[in-house]
Structure formats: C-alpha cells, structure tokens
Amino acid sequence: MKKGHLIGILMWMAFAFPAQAQNSIDRLVEEYSTSGPSVFTSAVERDPQTRKVVKVVNVLEVKSQQITPFVRAFEREKSTANVQTSIKNGESTVVLTCEKNGFRRIYMLQRRSDPRAYIGGKVTIIIKSITKK
C-alpha cells in the first residue's frame, strides 16, 4: 500500500505546476490517504507509443472521518477555477476545473447534501495532458 501511495505522490509531482491554487485540496488528499479509515486509489494512463503519462486519476474515499475539511477547501478554491455544482438524489457534487501549462486538473467532491451528514464522501482528482500532438 505504501508503494502505491508513493507512486501517486510521484505522479502528482510530475504534473505539478507553480502557484497552483488547488494545493490545499492536494495536501488534504495526501494527509487523509495515509491516515484513518479511508481508501486511496491511483491510476496512470500512458501514451502507448511514447510511454509518457497522459492522465492520472486519484480517488480518495473517506469512510468515517469528517468530510468537512474537504468541503471547506473546495469552498475556498471556488474563486480559482471553473465551478459546477449539482445536487441529485441526496448527493451533492462540486467540480472545480482549471487549465494551466498544458494540463487540465479536475477536482470533484461528492458527499451527501445534508450538512448534518458530513461524514464520508469521495474526492476525485484527474490530471490530464491537453497538449496537442
């Protein structure tokens, strides 16, 4: 499990760009992925010809810990990215999207829409190359 976490961190570093506003969400995911009852998965897509990384998907499912720190981080970051919010079937989804230096970063927070039920939720981070071939 530690090896998978290390690979995920290395992929984040490979796609990092300076002064990125979503660093607070990245830090929270990193912190929660190594502590408490949570599940962290990471997948990497490579170009089959060049073997370059073209997409990284990181998913953190927080089981019983409070999701409130993530809700606050997404609220703070709304002014730094394109934002879409929706509520469907009692589930709230917030999607932050930003593009910089040839990469599109998508941050998605899914949780129950009832504020009293801020326990458990899912954070998905997708980093995708948008450079033209």
Image: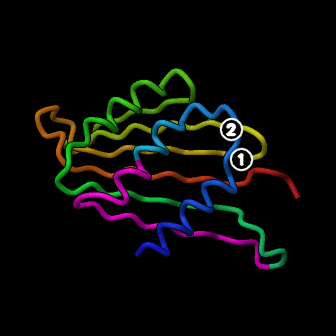
Q: Which residue occupies 35% across, 35% down?
A: 86
Q: In the drawing, does residue 98 fall left or right of residue 67?
A: right
Measuring from the top left, give residue 16's x and y in whole percent: 67, 47
Measuring from the top left, give residue 18's x and y in whole percent: 70, 36
Crowd tier of the residue under label 2, counting other residues whose Cα lies within 10 Å: few below 14, some 14–19, many 20 or above: some
Residue 80, located in which quarter of the rendered image? top right
- State the SS at label 2: strand
Q: Is residue 30 covered in magenta? A: yes
Crowd tier of the residue under label 1, counting other residues whose Cα lies within 10 Å: few below 14, some 14–19, many 20 or above: some
Residue position for label 1: 103
Amino acid type shown at disc 2: Glu
Residue 37, located in which quarter of the rendered image? bottom left
The magenta segment: 29-48
Residue position for label 2: 99
Figure quadrant of the C terminus: bottom right
Instruction: Give the vertical position of 38 relative to 27 (above or below).
Output: below
Q: In the drawing, does residue 31 fall left or right of residue 111?
A: right
Q: Which residue occupies 56% across, 69% down?
A: 7
Q: In the drawing, does residue 131 fall left or right of residue 67?
A: right
Q: Which residue occupies 26% across, 44% down?
A: 111
Q: In the drawing, does residue 66 fall left or right of residue 95?
A: left
